[in-house]
Amino acid sequence: MDVRLEGGFAALADGGESLAADGGTLEELLTSVAERAPRLGRRLFTAQGLLAGEVDVRVNGVDARLLGGLRAVLRPEDRVSIGPYPLKAMTPREAERYARQMILAEIGAAGQARLAAARVAVIGAGGLGAPAATYLAAAGVGHIVIIDGDRVERSNLHRQPVHHDADVGRPKAESAADTLRALNPDVAVTAVSEFLTAGNALRILGDCDVVVNGSDNFPTRYLVNDACVLLGRPLVDASILRFEGRLAVYLPRMGCYRCLFPEPPPPGSVPSCAEAGVIGALGGQMGSLQALETVKLITGAGESLGGHMLVYDALTGEQHRFALTADPHCAVCGDPPRQTSLVDYEAFCGVLAPHAAQEGLGIAVPDALALRSDANVQWLDVRSAGAIDRPTIPGAMRVPLEELGQGEILDRGRPVVVFCEIGRRSMLAAERLGRDGIAARSLEGGIVAWTAAGLELTP
Ligand SMILES: [Zn+2]
């Protein structure tokens, strides 16, 4: 392929505006360039053989560092250009703010300039997004887009210190954006107070260089993955539950989340943090690692975690790194892909949209309470089998969601109020019972809302 030489690099290669070179990876390509133009070659690599910080390499207009740096996979039709990275003057305030990270040889002035020019999307201003966005803003990422359709709840605060007690009830994206702007007025922050959907994901993520996923549900996780594959963006993904954290970086053309998990788990089979619990500092740990991997991608420092998953066990302090294998038959990143647009991820994951409650399946605690005197109403606890000994609403039957429909204990002719810990599993149950012809409604907020209202449970 022809490599375009820009900004004075042509003079180092005897004047030609481009140079013919070959390689299936960027490392092979630049090695081939260095062999053909040794004076230029000395500018491309450091003494350690790494891509030099002052060199700007673009593949189809995208900074090659975001594609994995020297590991970036190239195709014959790609347009590759190389030139010196254009440095911009820094204000004294910026120079002072970033002094401690700019003295790192791996970052330097060029790395700091790359951070300032970068636009990063952070999905979710929650347990992961809060620390990730905080460190990205502090590090000087020039533009952060924070996306969250929820409002701040007091139960968020133990693990989402980007929000403060006075923010309870505010849109999370706005609350987070205010904190980031106060922390670093030199970065731009855009708050998007809506949930990411198949309808808006490509528009919102389309002009971002890196996507950091801090969402906590499977439909969004698959949506974000597919959008990143379609857009050719690197995805820095993480999840936390109880005491375990996972981190993975998916680089364009090097596999994706669906190579590992082609199908979502059965609905309700993986508990949420609200159901199973989570330790706040674990979000801090994994979200900080997301920020770190993002900074590495943008600046090209070190070697990206790309192609690996890191699993951290907070109870033992141990962590393990596993290599991920790209699946050539993957539905979205395989060659050729079977899926070339976004789909309905709630349907794909077999779950309801977050606000199905508005469609009449939900019942608020006061309305449910009014039904307590109606002996005709059946009460059904669908929490997992592990919760079978926990206190429940007096008179309720217990059938874990997974076992619903196998052996009927409900009277099909009578209405049902179905509940779980927070109202998510019960919403699935109500929908399933409804399809079965049973009049079922899901207790909004579940046992948590019931006890918060001061109502009693059986011991
Ligand atoms: Zn894939």
Image (cartoon, rainbow, N blue to C red):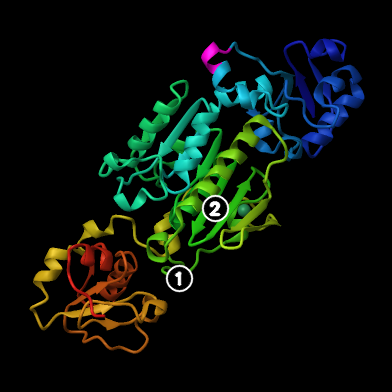
Compared with residue 181, is residue 349 higher up or lower down, i.e. above or below?
A: below
Residue found 49% across the figure and 51% down from its top? 281
**Identity, as a three-letter code, of the amino acid under mark 1:** Ser
Quick check: can you spot residue 161?
yes
Residue found 37% across the figure and 43% down from its top? 148
User: Where residue 265 appears, x then y in whole percent?
Assistant: 50, 67
Q: Which residue is mark 1?
A: 269
**SS assignment at label 1:** loop
Structural distance between the alpha carbons of marks 2 and 1:
26 Å
Q: Main secondary structure of the magenta part?
A: helix
Is residue 212 part of the magenta span, yes or no? no
Q: Which residue is mark 2?
A: 339
The residue lying toward the viewer, choosing from 264 and 171, is 171
**SS assignment at label 2:** loop
User: Where residue 30 appears, x then y in whole percent?
Assistant: 82, 29
The boundaries of the magenta stretch are 90-94
Left or right side of 49 for 57:
left
User: Is disc 1 surrounded by few (<14), some (14 to 19) or many (20+) residues within 10 Å?
Assistant: few
**Identity, as a three-letter code, of the amino acid under mark 2:** Gln
Left or right side of 93 for 35:
right
- Work out which quarter of the rendered image holds the C terminus and state it: bottom left
- Tell me: is circle 1 under 8 Å from ligand 1: no
Quadrant of the image occupied by residue 1: top right
Residue found 85% across the figure and 18% down from its top? 40
Between circles 2 and 1, the one closer to the viewer is: 1
User: Where residue 448 appears, x then y in whole percent?
Assistant: 27, 64
Q: Which numbered dot is residue 149?
A: none
Compared with residue 6, is residue 189 higher up or lower down, i.e. above or below?
A: below
Q: Are marks 2 and 1 in contact (CB under 8 Å)?
A: no
User: Where residue 238 appears, x then y in whole percent?
Assistant: 54, 51
Left or right side of 250 for 272:
left
